[in-house]
Amino acid sequence: MKKISIITLSAALLCGGNHLLQAQITLTSSGMATENTVITTDQVESDYEDNLNLGNPGANQNWNFSAAPTINYPQSQYFLSPLQTPFPTQFTTADLASTDELSDTADYAYYSLMNASFARLGVAGAGSVLTFNPPLKLFDFPFTYQSSLTQNSQVSGTSEGLTVTGTASTQVVADAWGTVTTSLGTLPCLRVKRITELSLTVLFFSIIQRDTVLEWWTNQYEYPVFEYNRNYTSIFGEEDYGSYALVLKEQSVPTKEPGSPAWTNIQATPNPVGSYTLLSFEIAKAGKTEILVVDAAGRTIARHSLGVVAPGAYTQSIDLSNASPGTYVVLLRQEGKLLGIKQLVKN
C-alpha cells in the first residue's frame, strides 16, 4: 500500500464566506495536475447512483454529494514527467504523463499541457501504442462558464500485436457553475460536461465506446472533486450500458510506489489452444465484470459473468474443446467498458 502525505486546504479556502462560495471560477493550465501529484478517488456504491442529484445546466447552483457512500477501494492516478516513464520515446513532445501503476508493464497516458490548451497525445504500454492525431483536447484555456470545444481526431497504433485504427471525437462544455459539497468541504465549482466517442477497428471487429461525463472542478484541486460517467459500448452491434461515480479523496505527493498493480494485460496459457486455456488478468477497480469469447464471424460463442469483483488478480478457464480451429478474441468488460483484448488461436 502506498504511503502519502496529504496536501491540506487552508482555512480561508474552506471558510471563505458566501461571497467566495458563489463566485464563478475559471480553469487555466495552472489548475491542472502537475508532475509528482497523486490523485486518489473512490467509487460511489452503484446502488446509490439513482439517489445522486446531478442537477441541470445553469448558473448559481448547489450540489451536495457528501452523503454518497463509497465502496472503500481507493484508486490512485500518478502524474509524472514523461522521462520517468518506460516509454518516453513514443511521445517526444509530451510534457506530462499519468498512470495507475508505477511499473514497466503498466499503461501510461501522455499529454501536452500548455498555457492555451491541455491535450492527450496517446497511450503506451508493454506491447501497445495508441496515438491521437491531432492530440485529443481536454481543455482550451481559459475555460469558464459556457466555454466549449469540439474536436475530431484519428486513432492509430497496436495493442497486443493487433493493429488498431479509428476515430475519436470530443465535445466539452462548461454547462453550470455554483457550489459543490463533498467530504472535502463546500467549494465554488465549475461543472464540465464531456462527451467522448471512440470508433475503433481491431482485427475483424469494430468497437464503439461513448462516455458522457459530468465533472465538478474547483480551484482548490487539480482534478474534479466529483465525476459521474455514463457509458455505452457496441461490439459487433452487441450493446452494453454502464455508469459509475467517483469522488476525490486526496490530492497528495507520492513517497512510495503502490504495493499491487492496478492493471495488467490478459495472459492466456496455453496459446495456441488445444481444448482449454487459462486466462490471467488483474482488475483495477470494483465493478460488474464479464468475459466474452468472439469468433471470426463476430458471434459470441462464450460468456462468463464474474459478477461484481473487487480489485485484484483473477483467472478464468476458457473451454474451446467444441470450437472449430481458427482465431478467436477474448474481450474483458466491466460496467459497459472494454478493459482488455486477447487473441486466441485454436488448433
Image: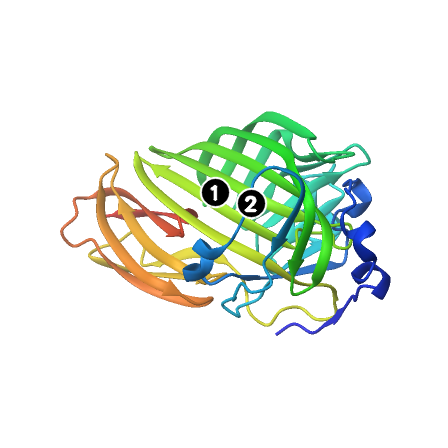
Tell me the SS state at disc 2: loop
- Name the disc covering residue 235, or none: none
List the single residue furthest toward the front. Answer: 18
Q: Which residue is mark 1?
A: 159
| Horizontal side, residue 338 vs residue 270: left or right | right
Q: Secondary structure at mark 1?
A: strand
Residue in view at x 43 percent, y 47 percent: 337
Sequence-wise, which precedes: disc 1 or disc 2?
Answer: 2
Residue 281 rendering spot, x and y as whole percentages:
42, 61
Name above or below for residue 280 compared with residue 326.
below
Q: Say which residue appears at 48% left-offset and 53% top-offset.
A: 244
* Quarter holding residue 80: bottom right
Point out the frontmost of discs 1 and 2: 2
* Residue 239 percent across, percent down from the top left: 32, 39
Looking at numbered disc 1 in the image, what kind of residue is underneath it? Ser
Q: Quadrant of residue 135?
A: top right
Location of residue 225 (image quadrant): bottom right
Q: What crowding class fits label 2: few (fewer than 14 Cα within 10 Å), some (14-19), or many (20 or more)?
A: few
Mark 1–mark 2 Cα distance, whole angstroms, equals 39 Å
Residue in the foreground of this view, choosing between 41 and 297: 41
Q: Contact, CB < 8 Å: mark 1 with mark 2?
A: no
Which of the two residues, 233 or 104, is positioned nearer the viewer here? 233
Per the image, the residue denoted by label 2 is 55
Residue 9 showing in the rendered view: yes
At label 2, the amino acid type is Gly
